[in-house]
Image (spheres, rainbow, N blue to C red):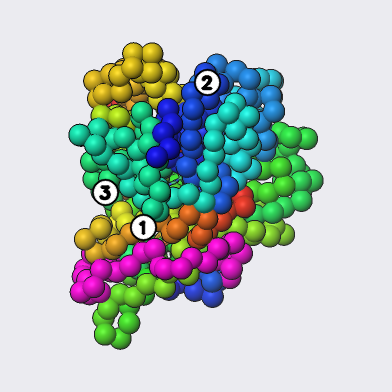
Amino acid sequence: MEKFDVIVVGAGLAGLAAAYTMSREGLEVVLLERGEYAGSKNVTGGRLYVNPVRHLFPDLWDQAPFERFITHEGFSMMAADRSITVGYYGNELNRAPYQSYSVLRSRFDRWLAEQAEAQGAMLLSSAKVDDVIIENGKITGVLTGDDGLHADVVIACDGVLSLIAEKAGLRNAGMPRDYAVGIKEVIELDPDLINARFNLEGDEGAARLFFGDITKGRFGGGFLYTNRESISLGIVVGIKALMEGEAFLEAPAFFDGFKERPEIAALIKDGTTVEYSAHVIPEGGYRSLTPLSGNGILVAGDAAGLALNLGVTVRGMEYALASGYYAAQTVLQAKDAGDYGAEKLAVYKTMLENSFVLEDFRNFRETPAVLDERRIVSHYPELFGKIMKDLYEIPGGPKNRLYPTIRRYLTIGEMLSMFKDFRKVMKI
Amino acid sequence: MSNSAGLKAKLGLDVFKPGLEPHIVIRPGMEKDPRLKKAILVCPAGLYSENEKGEVVLTIDGCLECGTCRIACGTDVLDWNYPDGGTGVQFRFG
Ligand SMILES: Cc1cc2nc3c(=O)[nH]c(=O)nc-3n(C[C@H](O)[C@H](O)[C@H](O)COP(=O)(O)OP(=O)(O)OC[C@H]3O[C@@H](n4cnc5c(N)ncnc54)[C@H](O)[C@@H]3O)c2cc1C
Ligand code: SF4
């Protein structure tokens, strides 16, 4: 039977980062991916922030097939019939090294897989792992179809559902409250039109986030990222919230409603949808992280629950890359010690604790709970939207003074509850 | 279904490699289970529907392998697997 140093399950960002790092150090790595090529099953929003992971892969970034570097930020609060948008542009966003880029995973993951292969990793695609092999309580390999592969250690990087970590007994099937679903279209659009519509030059890019009426009072939000020649448009909604919905509001309807908003329709006009995708996102935060390691196994990326939903924006790609890197470092240490037992591999958690990964998770441990509030996604967009409407409206008669117009909405009761909400937001 | 023709057209844009067997199966006897009804609401591809007998049926063609039905309904009612390696949806953009 074939035996390797390490088996990595899943060629997403976590798996590729792990395989790249370990094969660079001379380990014999086999990477198993169920898709026909790396990236063929993977969906993201997507914006990748490079700063937190730049130093972990110093040689990678120059050649990376990013779409655009993000220079224009925008944020919109959507009420049913109106919206308020805040835009941000800063010269610092337009100076290399750029802090974030839009990405399309099919292209990006494929490229990263080539980099890992160039370091010596063996990528087997169209290979679905069905189970783990357990001998004397230790994971010693995996089964794909009738083939068994053995290794000193297995790294489960198989994404949000992580059937592998489940088979290994590290976790159960997830609970709806800890997950959201993202639904997305890639819309092809002439680059000149993209630049004109979003005030961009050359490879500059725009990121726009939306929350409010689009999720009908449910926790979630919408996103729009400009790619080189397309726009990624998507909506993220908590699964539990979706399940509690009315019969007529099925998941695809949320996306359609969002896309049909006049604010959005104008941005994608004359574009051609070229792909429709959906994917589950872990968003339970620190509380619902799954065990990160066991006897002969490590878990990285979404498989371990390492994605954060900060209200309207999801971050998971940096955590996937970084956790893959630290899983690799753990394996390198374990190899030196010749010990792949649970105790030795637990150093992985310490490494993550000492890195930005679990520090972010600790810092933002309140977010999912705090933001899961109808007031924030329904009440405020309507309230501020109405205030803006009245401020902008010039009626057929005399216009009211501005202060009384605002005060009409901001009653004492309203201001008290705003204060309470504000205190909650302060926890983030 | 809100706009099933539009949804079908969108799914038609995606590349699918046919597999031999359906990778998600409603467990026998669970067709009327209330947990399964949730799948109708949550599936982004609109693949679940209810028939005249009040049973939930699943048409697997067009499955985006997103995992939402597995999380929403649970594995007591769904026998949920990924399709065989190299088959199923194939994202060209992601
Ligand atoms: C709509 C949406 C928007 C998002 N927006 C952002 C964003 O803007 N910024 C951000 O940072 N993050 C974002 N995220 C989160 C981010 O995409 C994920 O956190 C990230 O992709 C996780 O990477 P991963 O490598 O852990 O998992 P994945 O990318 O899911 O990779 C898992 C891999 O394992 C393979 N696999 C699974 N099971 C098996 C098996 N049994 N055998 C073999 N192979 C297997 C899969 O085919 C896949 O290639 C978003 C997610 C979604 C869905
Ligand atoms: S995995 Fe996603 S697309 Fe496929 S049936 Fe389940 S919910 Fe629908």
Tell me which label, 2 or 3, sits earlier in the chain: 2
Q: Is residue A346 above or below residue A243?
A: above
- Same-subunit check for callouts 1 and 3: no
Mark 2 or 1, which is nearer the eye? Answer: 2
Is B75 situated left or right of A402 in this image? left
Q: Chain of mark 2?
A: A
Residue A229, which numbered label?
none
* Residue that label 1 marks: B81
- Residue under the point 30% across and 19% down: A339
Mark 2 or 3, which is nearer the eye? Answer: 2
Residue A173, which numbered label?
3
Front in this rendered view, residue A140 or B91:
A140
- Same-subunit check for callouts 2 and 3: yes
Task: Rate crowding at label 2 as few (under 14), some (14 to 19) or many (20 or more) other CA atoms within 10 Å.
Answer: few
Task: Rate crowding at label 1 as few (under 14), some (14 to 19) or many (20 or more) other CA atoms within 10 Å.
Answer: some
Q: Are marks 2 and 1 in contact (CB under 8 Å)?
A: no
Q: Chain of mark 1?
A: B
Membership of B89 in magenta stretch:
no
- Residue under the point 25% across and 29% down: A295
Q: What span is colored magenta in the figure? A: B9-38
Residue A24, image x and y in percent? 55, 21
Front in this rendered view, residue A271 or A58:
A58
* Residue that label 2 marks: A26
Mark 1 or 3, which is nearer the eye? Answer: 1
Membership of B14 in magenta stretch:
yes
- Residue under the point 49% across and 27% down: A28
Dot 3 amino acid type: Ala
